[in-house]
């Protein structure tokens, strides 16, 4: 983090993390400090090997105290002495759910988003589904540039017309077809193709106890429907 | 292409081939050709040593840049709130009908380009049509014909 980069290595600062006083390296981002202490907050556009981007806003946390609290994206926020952080306050959870709702409305077919909805216990999506196939998290663009060194894809357009593309929307000479962009894409994997009619929220796994998503994160439920959405024999086609 | 390259070369030289001057260079190319030819963008990327996709991203981000050739007469119809309530939609429809193109397109003979803008800052004159940087206030569908005819000498 730029404003703390002058601080000598090894000197720690104290931050209040959910009411507990903990030590943190001033070179960390707030998200790194939160994850270091084992607190799980959802992220989508963050990857350890890539520069933080701060677009998905799911890592939102509340900082400050009293009347002066504000919501920040923790992946882009520096840590400093005496910083007060709440990762699961009511305001944070409400905001996080709304953000996820908007993301799901854009891309209802993503397994990762659907799993996250089950984890955050999102019950309904109030926005009209767009059925897009990209949430513009920029992971593929950063992967291509920073890890693969190819710089074959990037953003084009602006505002609602923004999209990810190759130069001049044509086959790119720079692209080595390494597939790293697809490897890192959070929406490329399709959601559970259970026997029930497709709705915006798959939501069957919200009803399982405990919620299955954290235990079977890698399981490909689009290959094997988890059938948690099946309530009775009449649902099976 | 060599003739074009030398033109683009002189534009790039004006800015000492600095990657930070990308927007200024693209502006000058746009001024020269009325649009940004693909070859010139490829050439700029090569000379400035920046990724092609970055040049493409900048060229598509700004509305001032166009990747399609534009017509000699550029007609902008203001669709801002004040113009909208005074019937700019009808003016636009009349222009579309007369020129036989949709907003954002150029006529086949390369004479006219029709575009919409969201406000030109002349709300008191609405509906406003800007034609080659000349402002025409209080436009009506009837006035459209005389506007187009005055240009066809």
Image (cartoon, coloured by chain):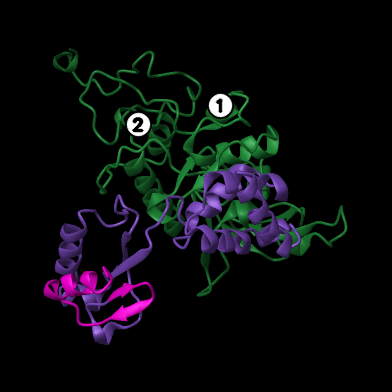
* Helix, strand or loop status at disc 1: helix
Q: Earlier in the sequence, mark 1 or mark 2?
A: 2
How packed is label 2: few (under 14 Cα within 10 Å), some, or many (20 or more)?
many
Front in this rendered view, residue B106 or A134: B106
Chain under callout 1: A
Horizontally, is A108 left or right of B149 in the view?
Answer: right
Location of residue A7 in the rendering, given as x and y in whole percent from the top left corner = 84, 61
Front in this rendered view, residue B54 or A199: B54
Q: Residue at x 74, y 53 (%)?
A: A24
The answer to whether one can see residue B130 in this image is yes
How packed is label 1: few (under 14 Cα within 10 Å), some, or many (20 or more)?
few
Number of numbered discs on residues: 2
- Chain A shade: green
Q: Residue at x 44, y 26 (%)?
A: A189
Chain under callout 2: A
Q: Is residue B1 above or below residue A16?
A: above
**Quarter of image, res A210:** top left
Residue identifier under label 2 = A109
The answer to whether one can see residue A88 in this image is no
* Helix, strand or loop status at disc 2: loop
The quadrant of the rendering that contains the N terminus of chain A is bottom right
Q: Residue at x 74, y 60 (%)?
A: A2
**Quarter of image, res B112:** bottom left
- Chain B shade: purple
Residue identifier under label 1 = A183
Q: Is residue A233 above or below residue A20?
A: above
Range shown magenta = B129-153
Location of residue B82 in the rendering, given as x and y in whole percent from the top left corner = 23, 79
Location of residue A235 in the rendering, given as x and y in whole percent from the top left corner = 17, 18
């Amino acid at each position: 983090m730029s404003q703390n980069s002058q601080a000598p290595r090894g000197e720690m600062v104290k931050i209040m993390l959910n009411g507990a006083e903990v030590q943190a390296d001033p070179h960390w981002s707030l998200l790194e400090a939160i994850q270091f202490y084992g607190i799980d907050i959802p992220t989508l556009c963050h990857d350890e090997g890539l520069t933080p981007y701060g677009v998905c806003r799911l890592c939102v946390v509340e900082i400050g105290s009293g009347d002066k609290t504000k919501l920040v994206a923790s992946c882009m926020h520096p840590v400093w002495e005496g910083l007060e952080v709440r990762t699961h306050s009511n305001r944070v959870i409400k905001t996080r759910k709304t953000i996820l709702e908007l993301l799901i409305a854009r891309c209802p077919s993503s397994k990762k988003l659907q799993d996250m909805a089950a984890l955050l216990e999102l019950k309904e999506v109030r926005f009209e589904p767009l059925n897009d196939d990209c949430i513009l998290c920029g992971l593929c663009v950063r992967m291509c540039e920073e890890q693969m060194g190819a710089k074959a894809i990037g953003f084009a357009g602006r505002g609602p017309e923004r999209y990810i593309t190759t130069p001049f929307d044509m086959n790119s000479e720079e692209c080595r077809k390494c597939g790293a962009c697809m490897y890192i894409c959070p929406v490329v994997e399709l959601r559970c193709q259970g026997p029930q009619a497709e709705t915006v929220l798959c939501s069957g796994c919200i009803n399982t106890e405990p919620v299955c998503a954290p235990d079977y994160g890698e399981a490909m439920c689009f290959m094997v429907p988890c059938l948690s959405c099946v309530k009775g024999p009449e649902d099976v086609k | 292409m060599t003739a074009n390259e030398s033109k683009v070369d002189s534009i790039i030289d004006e800015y000492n081939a600095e990657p930070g001057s990308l927007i200024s260079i693209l502006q000058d190319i746009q001024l020269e050709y009325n649009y940004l030819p693909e070859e010139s963008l490829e050439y700029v990327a090569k000379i400035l040593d920046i990724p092609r996709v970055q040049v493409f991203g900048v060229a598509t981000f700004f509305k001032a840049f166009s990747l399609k050739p534009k017509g000699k007469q550029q007609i902008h119809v203001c669709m801002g709130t004040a113009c909208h309530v005074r019937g700019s939609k009808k003016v636009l429809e009349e222009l579309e009908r007369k020129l036989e193109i949709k907003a954002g397109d150029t006529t086949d003979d390369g004479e006219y380009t029709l575009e919409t803008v969201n406000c030109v800052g002349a709300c008191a004159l609405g509906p406003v049509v800007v034609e080659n940087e000349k402002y025409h206030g209080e436009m009506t569908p009837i006035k459209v014909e005389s506007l187009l005819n005055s240009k066809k000498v």
